[in-house]
Image (cartoon, rainbow, N blue to C red):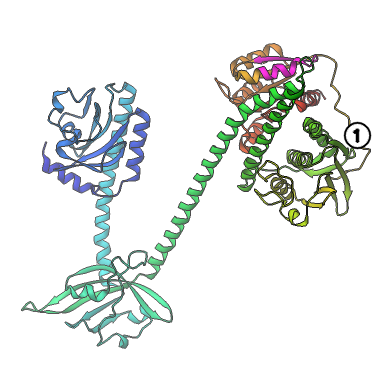
Amino acid sequence: MDAPLRLEVLQSVDLIDRPTDRALQDLVELVAELTGSAVVVLSLVGSQQVHHLARVGWLPEQTPYAQAYCSLAIECGDWVEVADVRVDPRFAQVTPAEGGPSWRHYAAQVLMLDGVAVGTLCVMDEGTTLLSSAARAQLQRCAKIACSALAQRRQLYQLQLQAGRLHDLARASGDWMWELDEQLRCNWISGDFEAATGCGTATALNRQMDDEPLVDALGQPVVPARGLRELLSQRLAFSRVLTRFDAGASEVRYLSRSAVPVFDADGLFRGYRGTTRNVTAGIVLEQQMQERALLQRDKEAAERISQARSAFLSRVSHELRTPMNAVLGFAQLMTQDTEQPLQGLQAQRLTSILRAGRSLMAQIDDLLEIAELQRGARTLRTDAVPLAPLVRRCFAKWAVEAQTAEVALQTDVPEGLLALADVEAVAQVLDQLVSNAIRYNRPGGRVRVSATIAPAGLIELTVQDDGPGLAPQGLQQLFTPFAQPAGARAMTGTGLGLVLVRELVVRMHGQVTAHSELGVGTRLTVALPAAPGSVAGTPADRAPASSSARVHQVLYIEDEPLNVVLMQEIFRGHAQWQLHVARDGGEGVEMARTLRPDLALVDMNLPDFNGLEVLRRLRADEMTRAMPCIALSADAMVEQIETALAAGFDDYWTKPIDLAGLMPALARAVAGAAG
């Protein structure tokens, strides 16, 4: 191999001792992904050093020639692969760096430029397994891309050199020319000096040139700080040196200066002759571009943080909800067991488990919900929402807690009252207010939910408790995150519940007010826009009737055994419902075709394919196209719910399952599909 020829070609590329080229780095990262190799390196072989232009895995920026495998590889043809370099005699002369990893498998495609081997694109691993034919083909294909990139880089470098020459010639004339004597006093100026600087020629003649500070391409002082006079004192030629020129009246201009020293026949220094161009506009543009680039970088960083936070919250939600579904579900089943009911202390312990589990889930939900609202990820719909059914559903959910706390639940919400709001958001608001009213009540107390039509087209939904009440200073802390109101009875919780209520109500164009009196209780009122046609009928408290007396068939597609057992236990006590279980998506789709159930509950994370694919296949089949499908999942992020609903799910229920509300919800879903 002609080493001088190789070095000449390398110099024409101008990549050695330069910052890592992003395109080449992306290429080696792609090779690492395609081949699964621990180390991928794109190297150019110099005379004393091997320069690693882009790399993945362990390797410094350069390696001594004698310690680099690629210095030998370029002598061995266009392709080299060795299962174990320790035993291959060709690599015996290579002495790996002391203390570095001991690579064994080595494969390299030699990079050719103008018929000269200039380097390699190689992969290395500590194992001894050779690349598959597919991986080898991918590596060789990427090596061709690398060669093309090097050729383009050389062409670009030559164009840059040519552009620099032309640029220097164009700038040599400058906006004006000048001459200095040996004392560095200006004795001649020509050109557009006054127009460019705003100063008259007389102000610069017969005086030393100002000691203008040297600046960089962004107009910032160079480091270490230097001035124009220091540069001139060196009596050396310089080109396109940037300086800052104060033109007076707080006006700043940036100048580009080029000059050569003048010597007489005896070699004595006689001054300078040079040119100057006003480059203020260019530097200001560079400053603006730099500012935009920084803003773009900050924006991208913020987006990455947001995406990482979403992924983290999604994972946390799923991993916590899955086990909590079993804990809360079986605890609820045990409290409802009439055949073998727990007695005395055991029943109290079970109630404590249920209360603690629900408290934990409420705190998790509050944290996730507020995070979603604050980053604008949740979109609220505006529909005509009937309030009375939501209150009944809320009371059913919290009936056990109210009974345990010896608190009575009373509703005075007339049928026919419709609020312009998001139905799920209103349900969340009710859950928060009613659960708080139960927790902060007294034994024998009451929680009363009422609603009336107020002036200005509003509906006022009020939740009142008979608790100890709050002092005025405590009332002021009611909507403060992570704070318990002064004077309130010590309770567990994050203090985020009412913060979430306020966020949701404000997003629905409503408002929340609070009133409390010590010894009497607390009243929270939510005002929401009334829907057209909203009328106050007679308060009613009836459960939805079963759609028919026949046995309803429900298909449950779920792979988690505990979730399956829990659902089977729930259905065991309901003779009009029959549950069928499929353990994965494929089995679920087949059972749906065979059974033709009234409804399918679909988990979103199945072992073979996800719930969205299950839905797609069911909707594509004429036999199952019209079957109601409800997503039932521990994934509770807004994006996941919206994606599922947009794909065509009829509803999306999150785990843990609310046993008290499950069967009525199923009845409503089946009745809605039938009607």
Name which residue type carries label 1: Ala
Q: Is residue 184 left or right of residue 146?
A: left
Asked whether 242 or 150 is in front, the reply is 242
The quadrant of the rendering that contains the N terminus is: top left
Residue on which disc 1 sits = 540
| Residue 517 to residue 60: above or below | below
Query: Can the viewer see residue 622 in this picture?
Result: no
Please report the residue visible at 28 percent of the width from the left and 78 percent of the height from the top: 211
> How far from the left and from the top, in percent, is residue 302?
51, 49
Asked if residue 118 is among those painted magenta in the image, a careful observer would answer: no
Q: Is residue 158 left or right of residue 597?
A: left
Please report the residue visible at 63 percent of the width from the left and 42 percent of the height from the top: 367
Asked whether 601 or 267 is in front, the reply is 601
Q: Would you call the spot at circle 1 few (<14 residues within 10 Å), some (14-19), or many (20 or more)?
A: some
Asked if residue 578 is among those painted magenta in the image, a careful observer would answer: yes
The quadrant of the rendering that contains the C terminus is: top right
> How far from the left and from the top, in percent, is residue 379?
67, 43
> How far from the left and from the top, in percent, is residue 562?
63, 19
Please report the residue visible at 80 percent of the width from the left and 15 percent of the height from the top: 576
Task: Give the residues drawn in magenta, as a range.
Answer: 565-581
Seen as rendered, the residue at the extreme left is 266
| Residue 245 to residue 531: above or below | below
| Residue 282 to residue 342: above or below | below
Q: State which quadrant residue 93 falls in.
A: top left
Asked whether 194 or 546 is in front, the reply is 546
